[in-house]
Image (spheres, rainbow, N blue to C red):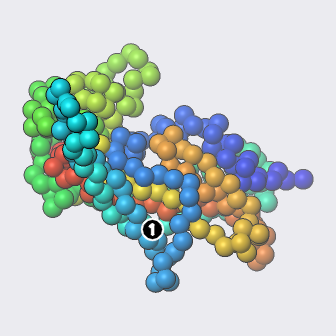
Amino acid sequence: MANTFSASTIKDIILEQEILISQHKVIDLDKFATNFSSDAIAQTGAGNGVRSTIQVDLASGASTTLTNPTNYEQGDSTLGSVPVSMNEYSQPFHITPAEAGSGRKIEKLIMVNLHALQDKIDSVVKGLFTTSNYGTAVLAKDPTTVTTADIKTIIQNTGKFKARNLVADASFWAQFAVTTDKDSLGTMDGAYGLDSFSYSTDWSGAGTNVNGFVGDVAAIAMAARLPENTSEVQAVMDMDTVELPNGLVVQICKWVSLASRNTWHSFDIVFGAGVGDATVGKLIQSA
């Protein structure tokens, strides 16, 4: 009898493969401002699948620090927000009865489709990386020729940033990745005076010649929810959720096609990204 893979079984497989998920080189979303939740969000009344806008909080100013106060109730912090438009992204895949008999094939199908969903979310974020959003690049240079002097240039020109999270393409990052410590490959927190330094492989969704970004936490605002399902849908589908290493919660669905009798699965999420504080984000471009 062929194996069956429930939504909870797929969740377990994903959790067991956490290293493979982390090794998929996309932007570290948790380095920036996020409003991630496992709450469900309904479609708007437009009938096109779009979800409501979500506000992502950005703390833009603290109250005045008091010296020798006689009144402790003075001043107030400034908490702003950025509206983020939300869209549902679904990654469907099916499993034939023959494939269901091979656990290793199932694992490969799960990982390649989960990576594809991560790639889509990554492209949504990188679509923000344009000169119209973040201005002139802080560095424009052939990524294969960058040196520590260029890191100094980036730091000098981001002096007012509270944090410097740098993500670049593999060619840029490789110039600094010579190390014998396997645990430092991927994200180098604190390296070269940066708060984080990582690489992401696909920059095709970014602006012209953009191959990197350096920003404070507030530079990018992102939100994530789960799709809302009716009670009828919940009654006929096997569902579960899984939290990925970057904090995103993804819905796992399983159902059987009455036409083909194949088992279908999907990974679903509602996600949005917007420009946060554009003054604390800078582009990096290839020459």
Q: Nearer the viewer, residue 94 or 131?
A: 131
Hey, which residue is sitting farthest bottom in the picture? 46
Q: Amino acid at mark 1?
A: Asn
Residue 27 shown left or right of residue 11 in the figure: left
Vertical comparison of 173 with 264: above or below: above
Q: Position of residue 174 (x, y in %)?
A: 29, 31
Look at 22% across and 36% down and name the residue there: 71
Residue displayed at 53% across by 66% down: 41
- Furthest residue to the top? 180
- When the figure is inspected, residue 164 is found, relative to residue 102, above or below; the finding is above
SS at circle 1: strand
Q: Nearer the viewer, residue 148 or 236?
A: 236
Task: Decide if residue 145 is in sight here.
Answer: no
Residue at numbered disc 1: 87
132 w.r.t. 216: above or below: below
Q: Position of residue 84 (x, y in %)?
A: 35, 63
Mark 1, residues whose alpha carbon is within 10 Å: few (<14), some, or many (≥20)? Answer: many
Relative image position of residue 284 (x, y in whole percent): 18, 45
- Viewed as shown, does residue 13 lie left or right of 278? right
